[in-house]
Image: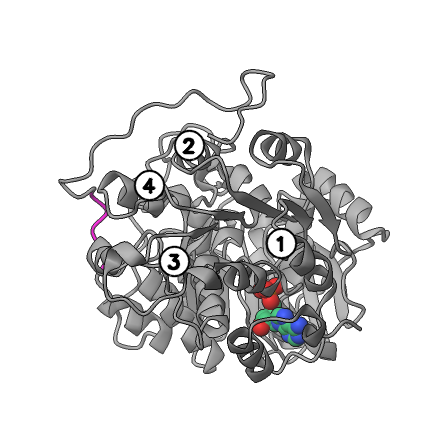
Amino acid sequence: MSSFSNLQLAPTLARAVAEMGYESMTPIQAQAIPVVLAGQDVMGAAQTGTGKTAAFSLPLLQRMLRHENSSTSPARHPVRALVLLPTRELADQVAQQIKLYAKYTQLRSTVVFGGMDMKPQTLELKKGVEVLVATPGRLLDHIEAKNAVLNQVEYVVLDEADRMLDIGFLPDLQRILSYLPKQRTTLLFSATFSPEIKRLANSYLQDPVTIEVARPNETASTVAQHFYSVSDDDKRRALRQVLNNNGLKQAFVFVNSKLGCARLARSLERDGLKTAALHGDKSQDERLKALDAFKRGEVDLLVCTDVAARGLDIKDVPAVFNFDVPFNAEDYVHRIGRTGRAGASGLAATFVSGSDQRLISDIEKLIKKKIELEALEFDDERPRGRFNTGRRAWGEDDPRDAIESPSSSSSRDSGHRGGRSRPAAPPADPFFNQPYEPTARAEDAPAASWEATQTRPSRSLSANIKTKRKVPALFKSDEPVGHD
Ligand code: AMP
Protein backbone atom coordinates (compact mmCIF):
# COMPACT_ATOMS: atom_id res chain seq x y z
CA MET A 1 0.00 0.00 0.00
CA SER A 2 1.49 3.31 -0.93
CA SER A 3 1.28 6.02 1.60
CA PHE A 4 0.80 9.72 0.94
CA SER A 5 3.82 10.43 3.14
CA ASN A 6 6.11 9.02 0.42
CA LEU A 7 5.02 11.84 -1.87
CA GLN A 8 6.55 14.62 0.18
CA LEU A 9 3.56 16.82 -0.33
CA ALA A 10 3.79 20.35 1.06
CA PRO A 11 2.70 20.43 4.71
CA THR A 12 -0.43 22.42 3.82
CA LEU A 13 -1.58 19.73 1.40
CA ALA A 14 -0.46 16.84 3.59
CA ARG A 15 -2.50 18.28 6.45
CA ALA A 16 -5.64 18.47 4.30
CA VAL A 17 -5.13 14.88 3.12
CA ALA A 18 -4.66 13.71 6.69
CA GLU A 19 -7.90 15.44 7.66
CA MET A 20 -9.73 13.60 4.91
CA GLY A 21 -8.76 10.41 6.70
CA TYR A 22 -7.12 8.80 3.67
CA GLU A 23 -4.76 6.12 4.88
CA SER A 24 -3.18 5.03 1.65
CA MET A 25 -3.28 5.99 -2.00
CA THR A 26 -5.73 4.37 -4.36
CA PRO A 27 -4.15 2.69 -7.43
CA ILE A 28 -4.83 5.67 -9.72
CA GLN A 29 -3.32 8.01 -7.14
CA ALA A 30 -0.22 5.85 -6.64
CA GLN A 31 0.35 5.81 -10.39
CA ALA A 32 -0.72 9.28 -11.48
CA ILE A 33 0.50 11.58 -8.72
CA PRO A 34 4.25 11.03 -9.27
CA VAL A 35 3.80 11.44 -13.04
CA VAL A 36 1.91 14.72 -12.70
CA LEU A 37 4.42 15.95 -10.12
CA ALA A 38 7.08 15.30 -12.74
CA GLY A 39 5.16 17.55 -15.14
CA GLN A 40 4.19 14.88 -17.68
CA ASP A 41 0.91 14.57 -19.55
CA VAL A 42 -1.32 11.71 -18.45
CA MET A 43 -3.89 9.62 -20.21
CA GLY A 44 -5.71 7.83 -17.42
CA ALA A 45 -8.36 5.14 -17.66
CA ALA A 46 -10.30 5.58 -14.46
CA GLN A 47 -13.85 6.29 -13.46
CA THR A 48 -15.43 8.30 -10.71
CA GLY A 49 -15.07 6.44 -7.45
CA THR A 50 -11.46 5.45 -8.01
CA GLY A 51 -10.03 8.49 -6.25
CA LYS A 52 -9.02 10.17 -9.47
CA THR A 53 -9.96 13.67 -8.29
CA ALA A 54 -7.21 13.58 -5.69
CA ALA A 55 -4.97 11.85 -8.24
CA PHE A 56 -4.92 14.96 -10.39
CA SER A 57 -5.73 17.71 -7.85
CA LEU A 58 -3.03 17.04 -5.30
CA PRO A 59 -0.08 17.14 -7.71
CA LEU A 60 -1.56 20.15 -9.53
CA LEU A 61 -1.94 22.04 -6.29
CA GLN A 62 1.54 21.03 -5.20
CA ARG A 63 3.06 22.35 -8.42
CA MET A 64 1.04 25.54 -8.26
CA LEU A 65 2.16 26.39 -4.75
CA ARG A 66 5.00 28.44 -6.22
CA HIS A 67 2.32 30.91 -7.37
CA GLU A 68 0.67 31.07 -3.97
CA ASN A 69 0.28 34.63 -2.72
CA SER A 70 -1.91 36.63 -0.39
CA SER A 71 -2.35 39.65 -2.65
CA THR A 72 -5.88 40.95 -3.02
CA SER A 73 -5.18 41.99 -6.60
CA PRO A 74 -7.03 39.77 -9.10
CA ALA A 75 -4.08 40.13 -11.45
CA ARG A 76 -2.01 38.09 -8.99
CA HIS A 77 -4.49 35.21 -9.20
CA PRO A 78 -4.80 34.25 -12.86
CA VAL A 79 -6.33 30.91 -13.81
CA ARG A 80 -3.48 28.41 -13.78
CA ALA A 81 -5.39 25.14 -13.78
CA LEU A 82 -8.55 24.31 -15.66
CA VAL A 83 -10.62 21.21 -14.92
CA LEU A 84 -13.37 20.38 -17.42
CA LEU A 85 -16.21 17.97 -16.69
CA PRO A 86 -19.35 16.97 -18.55
CA THR A 87 -22.03 17.66 -15.94
CA ARG A 88 -22.87 20.17 -13.28
CA GLU A 89 -23.01 17.63 -10.51
CA LEU A 90 -19.58 16.28 -11.32
CA ALA A 91 -18.14 19.77 -11.63
CA ASP A 92 -19.63 20.66 -8.26
CA GLN A 93 -18.32 17.49 -6.62
CA VAL A 94 -14.81 17.90 -8.01
CA ALA A 95 -14.73 21.60 -7.07
CA GLN A 96 -15.75 20.76 -3.51
CA GLN A 97 -12.97 18.20 -3.24
CA ILE A 98 -10.39 20.60 -4.62
CA LYS A 99 -11.48 23.21 -2.08
CA LEU A 100 -10.90 20.70 0.69
CA TYR A 101 -7.43 19.75 -0.57
CA ALA A 102 -6.46 23.42 -0.99
CA LYS A 103 -7.96 24.67 2.23
CA TYR A 104 -4.65 25.34 3.99
CA THR A 105 -3.06 26.95 0.95
CA GLN A 106 -3.69 30.41 -0.43
CA LEU A 107 -4.64 29.03 -3.82
CA ARG A 108 -8.15 29.98 -4.86
CA SER A 109 -10.61 27.82 -6.72
CA THR A 110 -14.12 28.13 -8.05
CA VAL A 111 -16.60 26.31 -10.24
CA VAL A 112 -18.80 27.47 -13.11
CA PHE A 113 -21.56 25.45 -14.74
CA GLY A 114 -24.76 26.08 -16.65
CA GLY A 115 -28.23 26.32 -15.21
CA MET A 116 -27.15 28.91 -12.66
CA ASP A 117 -27.05 32.69 -12.77
CA MET A 118 -23.84 33.90 -14.43
CA LYS A 119 -23.46 36.91 -12.12
CA PRO A 120 -22.17 35.26 -8.92
CA GLN A 121 -19.84 33.14 -11.05
CA THR A 122 -18.61 36.28 -12.79
CA LEU A 123 -17.87 37.96 -9.47
CA GLU A 124 -15.82 34.98 -8.33
CA LEU A 125 -13.90 34.88 -11.59
CA LYS A 126 -13.19 38.61 -11.49
CA LYS A 127 -11.68 38.29 -8.02
CA GLY A 128 -9.13 35.91 -9.50
CA VAL A 129 -8.82 32.13 -9.08
CA GLU A 130 -5.95 29.77 -9.68
CA VAL A 131 -8.08 26.67 -10.18
CA LEU A 132 -11.17 26.84 -12.35
CA VAL A 133 -13.52 23.86 -12.54
CA ALA A 134 -16.10 24.12 -15.31
CA THR A 135 -18.48 22.51 -17.72
CA PRO A 136 -17.55 23.40 -21.31
CA GLY A 137 -20.67 25.32 -22.36
CA ARG A 138 -20.71 27.67 -19.40
CA LEU A 139 -16.97 28.21 -19.57
CA LEU A 140 -17.33 29.38 -23.16
CA ASP A 141 -20.02 31.81 -22.01
CA HIS A 142 -17.56 33.26 -19.52
CA ILE A 143 -14.72 33.33 -22.01
CA GLU A 144 -16.85 35.23 -24.49
CA ALA A 145 -18.03 37.62 -21.83
CA LYS A 146 -14.34 38.14 -20.97
CA ASN A 147 -14.87 36.94 -17.43
CA ALA A 148 -12.37 34.13 -17.79
CA VAL A 149 -8.93 34.64 -19.29
CA LEU A 150 -7.03 31.45 -19.92
CA ASN A 151 -3.71 32.60 -21.32
CA GLN A 152 -1.80 31.66 -18.16
CA VAL A 153 -3.18 28.17 -17.81
CA GLU A 154 -0.48 25.64 -17.05
CA TYR A 155 -2.62 22.57 -16.35
CA VAL A 156 -5.71 21.24 -18.04
CA VAL A 157 -7.71 18.26 -16.89
CA LEU A 158 -10.25 16.72 -19.25
CA ASP A 159 -12.21 14.60 -16.83
CA GLU A 160 -14.76 12.00 -17.96
CA ALA A 161 -13.54 12.74 -21.46
CA ASP A 162 -15.45 9.83 -23.00
CA ARG A 163 -18.68 11.21 -21.65
CA MET A 164 -17.86 14.70 -22.89
CA LEU A 165 -17.39 13.31 -26.39
CA ASP A 166 -20.47 11.07 -26.10
CA ILE A 167 -22.68 14.02 -25.48
CA GLY A 168 -21.17 16.17 -28.16
CA PHE A 169 -18.85 18.52 -26.32
CA LEU A 170 -16.00 18.01 -28.78
CA PRO A 171 -16.43 21.34 -30.62
CA ASP A 172 -16.61 23.20 -27.31
CA LEU A 173 -13.54 21.42 -25.98
CA GLN A 174 -11.70 22.23 -29.15
CA ARG A 175 -12.55 25.90 -28.83
CA ILE A 176 -11.58 26.05 -25.18
CA LEU A 177 -8.27 24.31 -25.83
CA SER A 178 -7.55 26.82 -28.59
CA TYR A 179 -7.47 29.60 -25.96
CA LEU A 180 -4.80 27.90 -23.87
CA PRO A 181 -1.04 28.28 -24.03
CA LYS A 182 0.72 25.49 -25.91
CA GLN A 183 3.15 24.97 -23.09
CA ARG A 184 1.09 23.20 -20.49
CA THR A 185 0.45 19.88 -18.83
CA THR A 186 -2.67 18.10 -20.04
CA LEU A 187 -4.36 15.27 -18.18
CA LEU A 188 -7.12 13.25 -19.75
CA PHE A 189 -9.27 10.82 -17.79
CA SER A 190 -11.73 8.54 -19.44
CA ALA A 191 -13.53 5.33 -18.59
CA THR A 192 -12.48 3.86 -21.92
CA PHE A 193 -9.77 4.46 -24.48
CA SER A 194 -12.02 4.39 -27.50
CA PRO A 195 -10.59 5.38 -30.91
CA GLU A 196 -12.16 8.85 -30.46
CA ILE A 197 -10.47 9.30 -27.10
CA LYS A 198 -7.16 8.20 -28.57
CA ARG A 199 -7.53 10.75 -31.34
CA LEU A 200 -8.34 13.45 -28.83
CA ALA A 201 -5.25 12.48 -26.86
CA ASN A 202 -3.09 12.45 -30.01
CA SER A 203 -4.29 15.92 -30.81
CA TYR A 204 -3.91 17.56 -27.43
CA LEU A 205 -1.52 15.56 -25.25
CA GLN A 206 2.25 15.45 -25.58
CA ASP A 207 3.91 12.09 -24.97
CA PRO A 208 1.38 11.16 -22.34
CA VAL A 209 2.05 8.48 -19.78
CA THR A 210 -0.79 5.98 -20.01
CA ILE A 211 -2.22 4.82 -16.72
CA GLU A 212 -4.93 2.22 -16.47
CA VAL A 213 -6.52 1.11 -13.26
CA ALA A 214 -8.82 -1.88 -13.13
CA ARG A 215 -11.82 -1.00 -15.23
CA PRO A 216 -15.00 -1.24 -13.23
CA ASN A 217 -16.49 -3.63 -15.74
CA GLU A 218 -17.02 -6.12 -13.05
CA THR A 219 -20.09 -5.65 -10.98
CA ALA A 220 -19.84 -5.93 -7.22
CA SER A 221 -20.65 -9.38 -5.90
CA THR A 222 -22.82 -7.73 -3.25
CA VAL A 223 -25.34 -6.67 -5.91
CA ALA A 224 -28.01 -9.21 -6.85
CA GLN A 225 -28.69 -8.64 -10.53
CA HIS A 226 -32.04 -9.60 -12.00
CA PHE A 227 -33.18 -9.15 -15.56
CA TYR A 228 -36.93 -9.32 -15.97
CA SER A 229 -38.62 -9.84 -19.27
CA VAL A 230 -41.30 -7.14 -19.18
CA SER A 231 -43.31 -5.50 -21.94
CA ASP A 232 -43.05 -1.72 -22.12
CA ASP A 233 -46.63 -1.40 -20.96
CA ASP A 234 -45.99 -3.46 -17.84
CA LYS A 235 -42.84 -1.78 -16.62
CA ARG A 236 -44.50 0.48 -14.07
CA ARG A 237 -46.38 -2.43 -12.65
CA ALA A 238 -43.21 -4.48 -12.59
CA LEU A 239 -41.47 -1.73 -10.67
CA ARG A 240 -44.11 -1.76 -7.97
CA GLN A 241 -44.03 -5.55 -7.88
CA VAL A 242 -40.27 -5.75 -7.36
CA LEU A 243 -40.44 -3.04 -4.71
CA ASN A 244 -43.12 -5.02 -2.89
CA ASN A 245 -41.45 -8.41 -3.31
CA ASN A 246 -38.29 -7.10 -1.72
CA GLY A 247 -39.80 -4.77 0.85
CA LEU A 248 -37.84 -1.89 -0.65
CA LYS A 249 -38.24 1.64 0.66
CA GLN A 250 -35.99 3.53 -1.70
CA ALA A 251 -34.45 3.11 -5.12
CA PHE A 252 -32.92 4.85 -8.10
CA VAL A 253 -34.88 4.34 -11.28
CA PHE A 254 -32.88 4.91 -14.45
CA VAL A 255 -34.41 5.86 -17.75
CA ASN A 256 -32.75 6.80 -21.03
CA SER A 257 -34.50 10.04 -21.87
CA LYS A 258 -35.47 13.29 -20.22
CA LEU A 259 -38.97 12.97 -21.53
CA GLY A 260 -39.28 9.44 -20.19
CA CYS A 261 -37.85 10.60 -16.88
CA ALA A 262 -40.34 13.41 -16.36
CA ARG A 263 -43.22 11.29 -17.52
CA LEU A 264 -42.37 8.31 -15.37
CA ALA A 265 -41.86 10.49 -12.29
CA ARG A 266 -45.33 11.97 -12.79
CA SER A 267 -46.92 8.58 -13.29
CA LEU A 268 -45.31 7.13 -10.20
CA GLU A 269 -46.45 10.14 -8.20
CA ARG A 270 -49.96 9.40 -9.39
CA ASP A 271 -49.46 5.81 -8.24
CA GLY A 272 -48.83 7.19 -4.75
CA LEU A 273 -45.04 6.84 -4.65
CA LYS A 274 -42.98 9.75 -3.43
CA THR A 275 -40.88 10.53 -6.44
CA ALA A 276 -38.43 13.11 -7.67
CA ALA A 277 -37.02 13.46 -11.17
CA LEU A 278 -33.39 14.19 -11.92
CA HIS A 279 -32.60 15.11 -15.49
CA GLY A 280 -30.77 17.70 -17.51
CA ASP A 281 -33.70 20.10 -17.78
CA LYS A 282 -33.86 20.49 -14.04
CA SER A 283 -32.09 23.48 -12.60
CA GLN A 284 -29.09 22.84 -10.45
CA ASP A 285 -31.04 23.94 -7.43
CA GLU A 286 -33.82 21.48 -8.19
CA ARG A 287 -31.36 18.65 -8.64
CA LEU A 288 -29.59 19.32 -5.39
CA LYS A 289 -32.91 19.53 -3.56
CA ALA A 290 -34.05 16.25 -5.11
CA LEU A 291 -30.88 14.59 -3.92
CA ASP A 292 -31.19 16.02 -0.46
CA ALA A 293 -34.81 14.92 -0.22
CA PHE A 294 -33.76 11.42 -1.28
CA LYS A 295 -30.92 11.33 1.22
CA ARG A 296 -33.26 12.44 3.99
CA GLY A 297 -35.73 9.71 3.04
CA GLU A 298 -38.46 12.16 2.02
CA VAL A 299 -38.41 10.74 -1.48
CA ASP A 300 -38.76 7.03 -2.22
CA LEU A 301 -37.82 6.94 -5.86
CA LEU A 302 -35.31 9.08 -7.65
CA VAL A 303 -36.09 8.77 -11.34
CA CYS A 304 -33.02 9.84 -13.23
CA THR A 305 -31.14 9.89 -16.48
CA ASP A 306 -27.49 8.90 -16.76
CA VAL A 307 -26.23 12.40 -17.37
CA ALA A 308 -27.95 13.77 -14.30
CA ALA A 309 -26.90 10.89 -12.07
CA ARG A 310 -23.39 10.28 -13.29
CA GLY A 311 -20.80 10.29 -10.56
CA LEU A 312 -23.17 11.13 -7.75
CA ASP A 313 -21.60 10.11 -4.50
CA ILE A 314 -24.69 8.73 -2.80
CA LYS A 315 -24.13 5.80 -0.57
CA ASP A 316 -26.47 3.09 0.59
CA VAL A 317 -29.08 3.02 -2.16
CA PRO A 318 -30.80 -0.32 -1.55
CA ALA A 319 -31.87 -0.86 -5.14
CA VAL A 320 -31.38 0.35 -8.67
CA PHE A 321 -33.91 -0.16 -11.43
CA ASN A 322 -33.05 0.00 -15.08
CA PHE A 323 -36.48 0.96 -16.26
CA ASP A 324 -34.83 1.31 -19.65
CA VAL A 325 -31.84 -0.83 -20.57
CA PRO A 326 -29.02 1.68 -21.04
CA PHE A 327 -27.72 2.35 -24.54
CA ASN A 328 -24.12 1.97 -23.35
CA ALA A 329 -23.22 -1.20 -21.50
CA GLU A 330 -20.80 0.79 -19.35
CA ASP A 331 -23.69 2.83 -18.08
CA TYR A 332 -25.20 -0.40 -16.79
CA VAL A 333 -22.15 -1.01 -14.62
CA HIS A 334 -22.14 2.59 -13.56
CA ARG A 335 -25.85 2.62 -12.71
CA ILE A 336 -25.82 -0.50 -10.63
CA GLY A 337 -22.67 0.69 -8.89
CA ARG A 338 -25.01 3.06 -7.02
CA THR A 339 -26.13 0.11 -4.90
CA GLY A 340 -24.26 -2.57 -2.96
CA ARG A 341 -21.58 -0.08 -1.97
CA ALA A 342 -19.07 -0.67 0.79
CA GLY A 343 -20.07 -4.28 1.25
CA ALA A 344 -23.79 -3.57 1.72
CA SER A 345 -26.11 -5.81 -0.26
CA GLY A 346 -28.03 -4.28 -3.10
CA LEU A 347 -30.52 -5.20 -5.77
CA ALA A 348 -30.32 -4.27 -9.44
CA ALA A 349 -33.44 -4.99 -11.46
CA THR A 350 -33.39 -4.45 -15.21
CA PHE A 351 -36.57 -4.47 -17.28
CA VAL A 352 -35.92 -6.00 -20.65
CA SER A 353 -38.41 -5.64 -23.46
CA GLY A 354 -38.39 -7.24 -26.89
CA SER A 355 -36.23 -4.63 -28.58
CA ASP A 356 -33.44 -4.70 -26.01
CA GLN A 357 -31.68 -7.86 -27.14
CA ARG A 358 -28.61 -6.20 -28.61
CA LEU A 359 -28.14 -3.96 -25.58
CA ILE A 360 -28.38 -6.98 -23.29
CA SER A 361 -25.75 -8.89 -25.22
CA ASP A 362 -23.47 -5.82 -24.96
CA ILE A 363 -23.92 -5.91 -21.19
CA GLU A 364 -23.23 -9.66 -21.14
CA LYS A 365 -19.96 -9.09 -22.94
CA LEU A 366 -18.90 -6.31 -20.61
CA ILE A 367 -19.75 -7.99 -17.33
CA LYS A 368 -18.65 -11.37 -18.66
CA LYS A 369 -21.72 -13.10 -17.28
CA LYS A 370 -24.54 -14.91 -19.00
CA ILE A 371 -27.77 -13.00 -18.49
CA GLU A 372 -30.83 -15.11 -17.79
CA LEU A 373 -34.14 -13.36 -18.31
CA GLU A 374 -36.69 -13.97 -15.57
CA ALA A 375 -40.45 -13.74 -15.77
CA LEU A 376 -42.16 -11.67 -13.13
CA GLU A 377 -45.36 -12.77 -11.48
CA PHE A 378 -47.78 -9.98 -10.74
CA ASP A 379 -49.96 -9.96 -7.64
CA ASP A 380 -52.45 -7.53 -9.10
CA GLU A 381 -54.63 -7.79 -12.16
CA ARG A 382 -53.33 -5.85 -15.12
CA PRO A 383 -54.82 -2.38 -14.74
CA ARG A 384 -56.92 -1.14 -17.59
CA GLY A 385 -56.88 2.34 -18.98
CA ARG A 386 -54.35 4.82 -20.17
CA PHE A 387 -51.35 2.52 -20.04
CA ASN A 388 -53.00 -0.35 -21.83
CA THR A 389 -54.48 1.22 -24.84
CA GLY A 390 -51.95 -0.50 -27.03
CA ARG A 391 -51.08 2.90 -28.47
CA ARG A 392 -47.77 4.28 -27.46
CA ALA A 393 -47.29 7.99 -27.35
CA TRP A 394 -44.52 9.63 -29.30
CA GLY A 395 -41.31 9.55 -27.35
CA GLU A 396 -42.15 6.35 -25.54
CA ASP A 397 -41.18 4.00 -28.30
CA ASP A 398 -37.79 5.53 -28.88
CA PRO A 399 -36.30 7.22 -25.84
CA ARG A 400 -33.57 8.67 -28.03
CA ASP A 401 -36.14 11.27 -29.04
CA ALA A 402 -35.11 13.25 -26.03
CA ILE A 403 -31.88 11.66 -25.04
CA GLU A 404 -30.26 13.34 -22.12
CA SER A 405 -27.57 15.82 -22.96
CA PRO A 406 -26.21 18.69 -20.92
CA SER A 407 -26.58 20.80 -24.02
CA SER A 408 -30.22 21.22 -23.26
CA SER A 409 -29.60 22.76 -19.92
CA SER A 410 -26.82 25.23 -20.45
CA SER A 411 -27.77 28.69 -21.56
CA ARG A 412 -25.76 28.36 -24.74
CA ASP A 413 -26.46 24.78 -25.52
CA SER A 414 -29.10 24.66 -28.12
CA GLY A 415 -29.00 21.33 -29.76
CA HIS A 416 -25.82 21.34 -31.79
CA ARG A 417 -24.59 18.48 -29.68
CA GLY A 418 -26.03 15.14 -28.84
CA GLY A 419 -25.15 13.37 -32.05
CA ARG A 420 -27.36 10.49 -31.05
CA SER A 421 -30.62 12.36 -31.04
CA ARG A 422 -32.72 12.42 -34.12
CA PRO A 423 -34.96 15.25 -35.28
CA ALA A 424 -38.05 15.45 -33.18
CA ALA A 425 -41.13 13.93 -34.75
CA PRO A 426 -44.38 15.79 -34.20
CA PRO A 427 -45.89 14.58 -30.96
CA ALA A 428 -48.85 12.29 -31.32
CA ASP A 429 -49.91 13.02 -27.80
CA PRO A 430 -50.44 16.62 -26.70
CA PHE A 431 -49.25 15.56 -23.27
CA PHE A 432 -45.72 15.63 -24.61
CA ASN A 433 -46.02 19.22 -25.71
CA GLN A 434 -46.10 20.23 -22.09
CA PRO A 435 -42.78 21.03 -20.48
CA TYR A 436 -42.22 19.05 -17.32
CA GLU A 437 -43.99 20.69 -14.47
CA PRO A 438 -44.38 19.19 -11.06
CA THR A 439 -47.93 18.51 -10.07
CA ALA A 440 -49.14 21.13 -7.66
CA ARG A 441 -51.91 19.26 -5.95
CA ALA A 442 -52.15 19.78 -2.22
CA GLU A 443 -51.75 16.08 -1.51
CA ASP A 444 -48.54 15.91 -3.48
CA ALA A 445 -45.50 14.37 -1.93
CA PRO A 446 -42.90 16.69 -0.42
CA ALA A 447 -40.58 16.11 -3.37
CA ALA A 448 -43.11 17.65 -5.69
CA SER A 449 -43.87 20.53 -3.37
CA TRP A 450 -40.34 21.82 -3.27
CA GLU A 451 -40.13 21.56 -7.01
CA ALA A 452 -43.24 23.65 -7.32
CA THR A 453 -41.56 26.45 -5.40
CA GLN A 454 -38.51 26.59 -7.61
CA THR A 455 -38.09 29.26 -10.20
CA ARG A 456 -36.05 28.34 -13.20
CA PRO A 457 -33.00 30.36 -14.10
CA SER A 458 -33.21 32.23 -17.34
CA ARG A 459 -31.83 30.34 -20.29
CA SER A 460 -31.24 33.27 -22.56
CA LEU A 461 -27.74 34.38 -23.33
CA SER A 462 -26.77 37.57 -21.61
CA ALA A 463 -26.67 40.61 -23.87
CA ASN A 464 -22.92 41.02 -23.57
CA ILE A 465 -22.14 37.56 -24.86
CA LYS A 466 -21.18 37.58 -28.49
CA THR A 467 -21.90 34.69 -30.76
CA LYS A 468 -19.02 32.35 -31.03
CA ARG A 469 -16.78 32.11 -34.03
CA LYS A 470 -16.92 28.90 -35.97
CA VAL A 471 -14.17 26.36 -35.51
CA PRO A 472 -13.59 23.59 -38.02
CA ALA A 473 -14.51 20.23 -36.58
CA LEU A 474 -11.70 18.25 -35.12
CA PHE A 475 -10.78 14.94 -36.74
CA LYS A 476 -11.62 16.07 -40.23
CA SER A 477 -7.98 16.12 -41.05
CA ASP A 478 -5.54 13.34 -40.32
CA GLU A 479 -3.08 15.91 -39.09
CA PRO A 480 -2.76 16.21 -35.33
CA VAL A 481 -4.26 19.51 -34.30
CA GLY A 482 -1.51 20.25 -31.83
CA HIS A 483 -1.73 22.21 -28.68
CA ASP A 484 -3.50 25.28 -29.88
P1 AMP B 1 -13.34 10.28 -6.90
O1 AMP B 1 -13.10 9.05 -7.70
O2 AMP B 1 -12.25 11.26 -7.01
O3 AMP B 1 -14.70 10.86 -7.15
O4 AMP B 1 -13.34 9.84 -5.34
C1 AMP B 1 -14.33 9.02 -4.79
C2 AMP B 1 -14.33 9.06 -3.28
O5 AMP B 1 -13.15 8.48 -2.76
C3 AMP B 1 -14.39 10.47 -2.70
O6 AMP B 1 -15.41 10.49 -1.71
C4 AMP B 1 -13.02 10.69 -2.09
O7 AMP B 1 -13.08 11.53 -0.95
C5 AMP B 1 -12.59 9.29 -1.73
N1 AMP B 1 -11.12 9.09 -1.76
C6 AMP B 1 -10.24 9.63 -2.63
N2 AMP B 1 -8.99 9.21 -2.36
C7 AMP B 1 -9.07 8.37 -1.31
C8 AMP B 1 -8.10 7.61 -0.56
N3 AMP B 1 -6.81 7.62 -0.87
N4 AMP B 1 -8.55 6.87 0.46
C9 AMP B 1 -9.87 6.84 0.77
N5 AMP B 1 -10.83 7.53 0.12
C10 AMP B 1 -10.43 8.29 -0.92
Distance between mark 3 and mark 4 Cα atoms? 18 Å
In front: 460, or 154?
A: 154
**Residue identified by numbered label 2:** 178
Which amino acid is tagged 3?
Glu
Instruction: Give residue 140's mark.
Output: 4
Which amino acid is tagged 1?
Val
Distance between mark 3 and mark 1 Cα atoms? 17 Å
Q: Residues within 10 Å of mark 1 (few under 14, many from 20)?
A: many
Magenta residue span: 456-460
Left or right of 52, for residue 222: right
Nearest to N terminus: mark 3 or mark 2: 3
**Residue identified by numbered label 1:** 36
Q: Residues within 10 Å of mark 2 (few under 14, many from 20)?
A: some
Nearest to N terminus: mark 2 or mark 4: 4
Which amino acid is tagged 4?
Leu
Distance between mark 3 and mark 2 Cα atoms? 19 Å
Select label 1 or label 2 by which is in front.
1
Task: Tell me the chief SS of the magenta region.
Answer: loop
Distance between mark 1 and mark 4 Cα atoms? 26 Å
Left or right of 86, for residue 457: left
